[in-house]
Amino acid sequence: MRGAFLIAVLLALGATPAFAVKPDEMLANPTLEARARAISADLRCLVCQNQSIDDSDADLARDLRLLVRERLVAGDTDKQALDYIVARYGDFLLLDPPFKAKTWALWLGPFVVLAGAALAVGVYVRRQARRAEPATTPLSADEARRLRDLLDGPHG
């Protein structure tokens, strides 16, 4: 029982996020370091794209982390540091980009793709349903007579 518990604890510890920030990047001032971490958590790694720069091992992510720290040491507020980096790299760098004309594709793109896919499925289903419909041509007089004879049978 203890072995299973130990394995569960080790797995849980292994599941915690691993930050890519190296000790030589960290600021000596814990307040500034906490601010840098908070800003870095909101910035997308341009190489990985699905990770924050705080989580990425990419060289560009490291450069961005150092730039954030450099701006904070220079006296920038969090907003000023973020605005400086966004001005250089664009809104795509933000993990939660603002909703404005330049970012409509980021916000609305998934819904447009989803609507297009739903439309394509709808068209496909309608075409398949039309193919499955039986022909509705009327019976000829001879066919109608034969059908009546079959339905009336020998009893009729």
Image: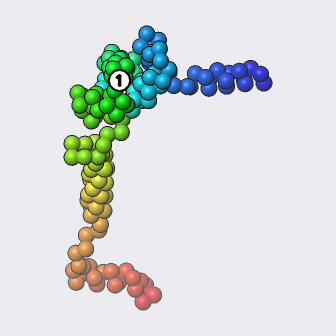
Residue 87 placed where, x, y %? 23, 31
Decide if residue 77 is on the left or right side of residue 8: left
Number of numbered tags placed on the structure image: 1
**Amino acid type shown at disc 1:** Gly
- For residue 59, above or below residue 93: above
- For residue 79, above or below residue 150: above
Nearest the camera: 127 or 91? Answer: 91
- Image point (37%, 19%), residue name: 73
Can residue 115 be seen?
yes
- For residue 87, above or below residue 148: above
Nearest the camera: 118 or 49? Answer: 49
Nearest the camera: 123 or 51? Answer: 51
Decide if residue 138 is on the left or right side of residue 56: left
Residue 76 picture quarter: top left
Q: Quadrant of the C terminus?
A: bottom left
Residue 37 placed where, x, y %? 44, 25
Q: Quadrant of the N terminus?
A: top right
- Image point (25%, 74%), residue name: 136
Residue 111 placed where, x, y %? 31, 50
Residue 88 picture quarter: top left
Nearest the camera: 86 or 17? Answer: 86
**Residue farthest along the right direction in this orientation:** 1
The crowding category of the residue bearing disc 1, from other C-alpha atoms within 10 Å (few below 14, some 14 to 19, many at least 20), is few
**Residue farthest along the front direction in this orientation:** 75
Q: Secondary structure at mark 1?
A: loop
The image's colour scheme reads rainbow
Question: Label 1, on which residue?
Answer: 75
Can residue 37 be seen?
no
**Residue farthest along the top direction in this orientation:** 24
Residue 103 placed where, x, y %? 25, 42
Decide if residue 32 is on the left or right side of residue 142: right
